[in-house]
Amino acid sequence: MQRLQWGLTSLVLLGALGIGVNRWQRSQPQFQSIQPLPQHSQIQVYMNQNLANSFTDSYRQISRPGDDLESIIVENIQAATSTVDVAIQELRSPRIAQALRDRKQAGVQVRVILENTYSRPWSSFTSQEVARMDPRQKKRYQDNFQLIDQNQDGELSSAEIHEYDALQVLRRADIPWLDDTADGSAGSGLMHHKFVVIDGQTTIVTTANFTLSGLLGDLDQPDSRGNANSLVVLESPGLAQLFTEEFKALWGDGPGRTTDSKFGVNKPWRPPQTLKLGNAKVQVQFSPTSISRPWSRSTNGLIRQTLAKAKQNIALALFVFSEQSLVDQLAGEHQQGVKIRVLGDPQFAYQSYSEVLDMLGVTLSPSRSGTLTCKAEPQNRPWSPPLQTVGTPQLPKGDVLHHKFGIVDSQIVIVGSHNWSDAANRRNDETLLVMEHPQIAEHYHREFERLYASSRLGIPAFLQKKAQDHQRQCGDLLVRGRGTTQPVLPEGKQATLVNLNTANQSELEALPGVGPKLAERIIEARQERLFTSLADLDQVPGIGPKLLEQLRNRVTW
């Protein structure tokens, strides 16, 4: 019988885990349920912290509020009669792996695509490899060791590995899988998809990875309820076909054959596709979009176009928000009277690259090796006055805000695996859905309000102090990094300056030598990267030396 030793430290941790399990069994949390919302006939929405539902965690045996995302995935897989295609960044759930194994044994075609960073069974790591892991990776290894080690004896038996190490379950069942090195590369930016297509009819799209922390909660954190995530089940052969086409591009002819898989910018680019699912409208687009294509045709471009439809309110709950053009769009909506509310995950919201900082009116300098660079991102545009309805939710220990959704006018939902970042837009394999129907939006609205009710809004004291420290150390260098420098006019000359980063089409066309086509190209260019100098304007096709000189004292940025 194969056995892997974990060591004395791990046994101590397992002992602590056993105590925790007993405590959960003795004292169950009390919670007040609320009325469930009606579901759309073809689009069902679920939240793993939904207060309108409850279930028993099958690993920790605790009763808790929420939709059991793992069971929803398992039940849909178990219903498959012909095909199951899974594209998921990380798959560590034993129950999902077992469901895939059972379908394979029943004659169903099962295929799996993973991110290469997570395409190795945990039980295959040697003690030497574990010793070389960084603290975060080692913690992940220990957590999964606990999951696989069902009898908690500090060893992994062959029986435990074959039943509870998810990737070994797939391997033992002879389920083919590949990762994003199958195209002959070292891997795409990230194979970040999180979708399942079943029988060419049902598509599951979620923000959760197929892990305990993503779906249910951490084994060693009694209060953990899982990273805040949503899951959508869509019934439509047409939509399933779009996801199948994406899967086929990644899959090629499968593992171990020719390197014809296509990941990242190597796969065929497709514009957004629009379908009707009953009385709901759904748009789907897949990332990435090469820099050779206009930013407006990318997934982030689709997000911007959707935000631009707002007339009354926008609510966002985002794991990562670092795309400048999107926060600039929000600034314009805010100036037009649209109510903006934004929640970001605490670990990312206050980083120097985060657009949450722009909305809070704060500029920070990134650091290298512990030293401030005093070079704020040149595209930064801090809001003044700061937005008071932006902040971070208070979450149980071990959980993060992993949502990636936006709600526009209580009617349109933007959601998918796609974080609102340049990496998701230009490098990663991602899914973006835009769903238009008030019944669907209400599910996301309720989740947002749940998180918002206990959130810390505005500028926290520690961030205020950090910003002051950065300003004190960097001074004017930090201010100049914002890209707010104005051009100098000749003495005595007056002109109404047109801001290249905010002017609309007609304002740009009013400039000398700028017609409709050139105005469109200027708008296109700033969606890719905001103007910070005349040199940036000189890069726009159609701007020659003569026209640049004409515009020198007529524009700002």
Image (tube, grey):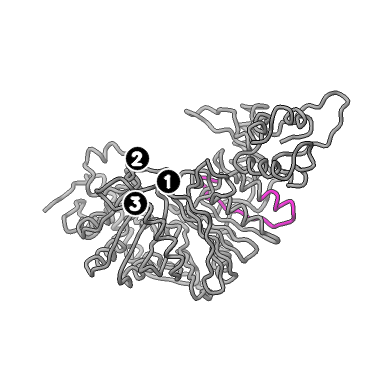
Q: Which residue is mark 1?
A: 264
Q: CA distance from mark 3 to mark 2?
A: 14 Å
Marked residue nearer the N-terminal end (2 or 1): 2
Residue at the limit of the structure toward the top, as seen here? 491
Is residue 42 or residue 509 the one in the foreground?
509
Residue drawn at 78 percent across, 26 percent down: 488
Q: Secondary structure at mark 1?
A: helix
The residue that disc 2 covers is 185
Mark 1 vs mark 3, CA separation in Å: 13 Å
Give how far across and how far down residue 273 sits, in percent: 52, 60
Compared with residue 547, is residue 142 higher up or lower down, i.e. above or below?
Answer: below
Q: Quadrant of the C terminus?
A: top right
Q: Which mark is residue 419?
A: none
The residue type indicated by label 2 comes to Ser
Q: Circle 3 sits on which residue?
A: 114
What residue is drawn where x is 68% and y is 27%?
476
21 to the left or right of 6: right
Residue 337: within the magenta?
Answer: yes
**Is residue 186 positioned above or below 81 on the image?**
above
Residue at image location 50% in from the left, 76% down from the top: 41
Looking at the image, can residue 66 be seen?
no
* Position in image of residue 218 (x %, y %): 37, 56
Q: Which amino acid does the dot numbered 3 rest on?
A: Leu
Q: Is residue 377 left or right of residue 114?
A: right
Residue extent of the magenta highlight: 330-349
Residue 61: image location, x then y, percent? 33, 66
